[in-house]
Amino acid sequence: YEMVLGNTYHLLVAPGPERIAEAGGLHRFMGWEKAIITDSGGFQVFSLAHGGVAEEIKGSGRKMYGLAKTLGIEEEGVRFRSYKDGSELMLSPEESMRVQAALGSDIALVFDECTPFHADREYTARSTERTHRWLKRCLDWHEANGPSGQAVFGIIQGGTHADLRKESCEAVSASGVDGISIGGTLGRDKEEMAEVLGFTVPNLPVEAPKHLLGIGEVDDLMRGVALGLDVFDCAVPTRLARHGMALAPLPDNRFRIDVRKPREIGNRDPLVPGCPCTACAAYDRDYLNYISKSEELTAVRLLVDHNLTYMERLMRGAREAISDGEYSTYSEKILAGSTPWDAR
């Protein structure tokens, strides 16, 4: 992997940007020498009102997540309560950029309002216009105060509405950002997501780096690359691992195996033959079933290692196939059930 994403919302709540800055920034704080992108924190604070981050907050290790709530959305920014101690916090365009500057990420995302799927067109239009005003405030702050080596990506909003997405593409593209992320609701299912991306991506500059926020399932990645998207972020590898699941070339089962199922008892096969990860090289499904059902942390670690390895090989294969002019063939093989190493 060449880049990781840091979550500004969670890092703001704890351990706090000041502590990370004193440690020398995120790179030094967590011992990561490659690139780091930080989101704006907008997705989490706007999702709080709709229950969209309950899983993340419950995983904080404390039973304080009931305190977390969005208190108000204003032109200035968003007020919300910390899930750690219930204190009131404010996240504005300027504060989001200040926090990301303190974190020392290589790429910062502008502060945006992430509208839910059920928001009507009128609200989505007002929200998108506000996001564009916040874009200017983010860029103004960064130009005056931001680190010289930190790139800034703008974010496309507009919900599932083609005209609003087009307006957002035009506004963000004209702003002079270093790259463009596509955010907000992309529809109720994969078919609608493909439709939204289909009328959004063509309105973006060909030369701009394009980042699809929060999408990372195998089939979505293959179709996203085909549309011309360059960067993806998602918690799929770790989320699946926490629930005892491993990525696998199984299109009829959403490209995953549930190792906790009784059918894996006594199964001496690796998760995926040919996979170079530790879980596949050293252990069989029977053992992984046992430690997963026993809720041992080793199970999560091994499944995370497998899922990250599988995903890295998947995207490495995509890059190589693009270089060789064979991406369509590679994608077809993956979607039909080939492993990344067999598809090449």
Image: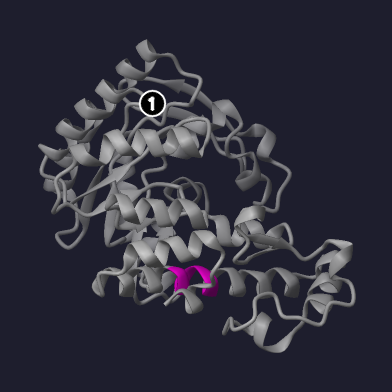
The three-letter amino acid code for the residue at tag 1 is Thr
Q: Is residue 112 left or right of residue 262?
A: left
Q: Is residue 256 above or below residue 281?
A: above
Question: Residue 147 in magenta?
Answer: no
Foreground of the two, 190 or 327: 327
**Is residue 216 at least partly visible in the picture?**
no
Write the residue at 43% across / 70% down.
Answer: 29
Question: According to the image, what is the colour scheme of the structure?
Answer: one colour
Assign a secondary structure to mark 1.
loop
Callout 1 environment at 10 Å: few (<14), some (14 to 19), or many (20+)? Answer: many
Quarter the N terminus occupies: bottom left
Describe residue 277's horizontal placement relative to residue 2 as left or right: right
> Which residue has dot 1 on it?
160
Which residue: 69% across, 75% down?
271
Residue situated furthest bottom in the rendering: 282
Is 312 within the magenta? yes
Horizontal side of residue 335 vs 146, given as left or right: right
Is residue 124 depicted above or below 87 in this figure?
Answer: above
Q: Nearer the viewer, residue 77 or 166?
A: 166
* Magenta-tinted stretch: 309-314
The image shows a total of numbered marks equal to 1
Q: Quadrant of residue 148?
A: bottom left
How far across and down, in percent of the image, does residue 9 sit? 46, 45
Coordinates of residue 98 in the picture (x, y in percent): 29, 47
Side of 143 where 17 appears, left or right: right
Q: Residue at x 10, y 37 (%)?
A: 174
What is the x, y in percent for residue 23? 40, 69
Identified at 60% across, 35% down, the residue is 86
Q: Nearer the viewer, residue 123 or 95?
A: 123
